[in-house]
Amino acid sequence: MKFNVGGFDRALRIIIGLVLIALAATGTVGWWGWLGVIPLLTGLMRFCPFYSIFKWNTCPLSKRQD
């Protein structure tokens, strides 16, 4: 699997995912807060299926896997 999520993008996804999950767990937001699992997983795996559909890539050339 090729990486297509770069450093800043990855950190932002992980932070947003954790915040949404925490808000859902504490009851601050509704069930939709659990959707934070999606950005969290894409950040941790450094791969976004949406990016691959549109051939986007925020990962530097030196860190991509072939």
Image (cartoon, rainbow, N blue to C red):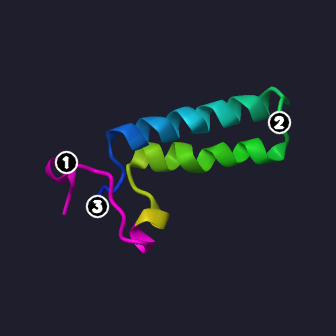
Prevalent SS, magenta region: loop
User: Tag 3, which secondary structure?
Assistant: loop
**Residue 63 against residue 17 in the figure, above or below:** below
Sequence-first tag of 2 and 1: 2
Q: Which residue has dot 1 on it?
A: 63
Say which amino acid is labelled 2.
Val
User: Tag 1, which secondary structure?
Assistant: helix
Q: Which residue has dot 2 on it?
A: 29
Q: Which of 58 and 37 is in front in this view?
A: 58
Label 2 with label 1: CB-CB less than 8 Å: no
Q: Where is residue 57 in the image (x, y as percent from the top left)?
A: 33, 59
What segment carries the magenta color? Answer: 52-66
Sequence-first tag of 3 and 1: 3
- Graded by Cα atoms within 10 Å as few (under 14), some (14 to 19) or many (20 or more), the crowding at tag 1 reads few
Return the mark for residue 2: 3
In magenta segment, residue 21: no
Q: In which quarter of the image is the N terminus?
A: bottom left
Of all residues, the one furthest to the top in this rendering is 26
Gap in angstroms between the C-alphas marked 2 and 3: 34 Å
Q: Which residue is drawn at 68% across and 36% down?
A: 20
Say which amino acid is labelled 3.
Lys
User: Tag 2, which secondary structure?
Assistant: loop
Q: Nearer the viewer, mark 2 or mark 3?
A: 2
Query: Horizontally, is 51 left or right of 26 in the view?
Result: left
